[in-house]
Amino acid sequence: MSAAGDQTQAAVAIIDYGSGNLRSAAKAFERAAREAGYAGIIKVTGEPDAVRKADRIVLPGVGAFADCMAGLCAIPGMREALEEAVRQHAKPFLGICVGMQLMASLGREHGEHQGLGWIDGEVVRLQVHDPALKIPHMGWNALEILHPHPLFRGIESGTPVYFVHSYQFIPRDGARILARTQHGGAVTAAVELDNMVGTQFHPEKSQAAGLRLIANFLGWKP
C-alpha cells in the first residue's frame, strides 16, 4: 500500500477523510488485486489531486452520516475532486457502508443533513418490530441480488455478507436498488447508477464473497 503522501498516480484511490476502516479496506483491496492479477496501485489518500488522477475511487465510511459528510467536506477541494472524477469523468466509484449512504440526497440520522445527491433518496433508520432483532443490524446476512450487474459476477443470491449499520438508503427510484437483505423487512444492501455502485455491507469483512466483489470492481468498465 502506498503511503498517503506518495505522489505516484494511484490506480485505485481509497479516500481517507477520517471516517473509514482504512487498513482493513486497503488490505482487502491489495489481496483481491493480487489474486486477480491486477497490477495497479492501491493508495489510501486524503489528497484531492490523487483522487482526480485515480482510475477508480473508493469511499469507505464508518460512523454517523453527518460526521462523515462533514469530514469529507472539511478537506479543501475533496468534494470538488470527487464531483469531477465521478460525475464529470465517470470513473468507477464504490461507496462502502456510510460511504454508500453519502451518495443519497438526504440523511436523517440525528436531524436532516445533505448528502452528495448522486442518487436521489434518503437514509433512514432501520425499523424492526421483532424484539429478537436488534439495531444496529450487525452480522452475516444473505444477499438477494435483484438484477445482474458486473459487481456481483460470480456471487449468487443467498451468499452471506457482513453488515454493521443502523440506517439504510432508500432510493426514490427503486430500480437503483441492486441488492437487498432481510432484517425485520427488506433492507437495501447495494445500489447502482451508471458508473457508481455502493454496498451497505462491508466487502472487506465479507471473506471470499467480498474479495470477489472487490476483484469485480477492479475489472469493471462501466
Image (tube, grey):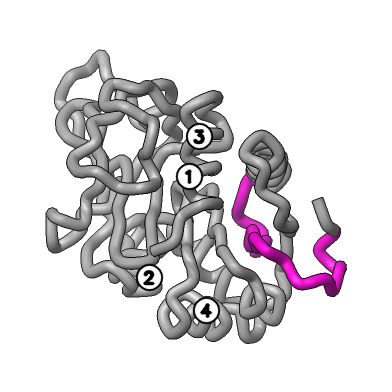
Q: Is residue 68 left or right of residue 191?
A: right
| Label drawn at residue 212 | 3
As drawn, the label of residue 216 is: 1
| First-in-chain label (2 vs 1) | 2
Q: What element does badge 4 sit on? A: helix
Graded by Cα atoms within 10 Å as few (under 14), some (14 to 19) or many (20 or more), the crowding at tag 3 reads many
Q: Earlier in the sequence, mark 4 or mark 3?
A: 4
Residue 214: give x, y in percent of width and height: 53, 43
Q: Name the residue carrying label 2.
A: 115
The disc label shown at residue 29, or none: none
Q: Inspect this view and state whether residue 42 appears.
A: no
User: Could you say which quadrant of the image residue 146 lies in?
Assistant: top left
Report, in whole angstroms, how far the alpha carbon at label 4 lies from the one at label 1. 20 Å
Q: Tell me which amino acid carries mark 2.
A: Gly
Residue 142 falls in which quadrant of the image? top left
Residue 199 image offset from top left, x and y in percent: 40, 46
Disc on the earlier residue, 2 or 3: 2
Residue 96 in sight from this viewpoint: yes
Which is closer to the viewer, label 2 or label 3? 3
Quickly name the residue at label 4.
85
Q: Which residues are magenta?
A: 3-21
* Label pair 4/2, CB-CB below 8 angstroms: no
For marks 2 and 1, give the one nearer the viewer: 1
Earlier sequence position, callout 4 versus callout 2: 4
Compared to 162, does 50 lie above or below?
A: below
Gap between marks 1 and 3 measured at Cα: 6 Å
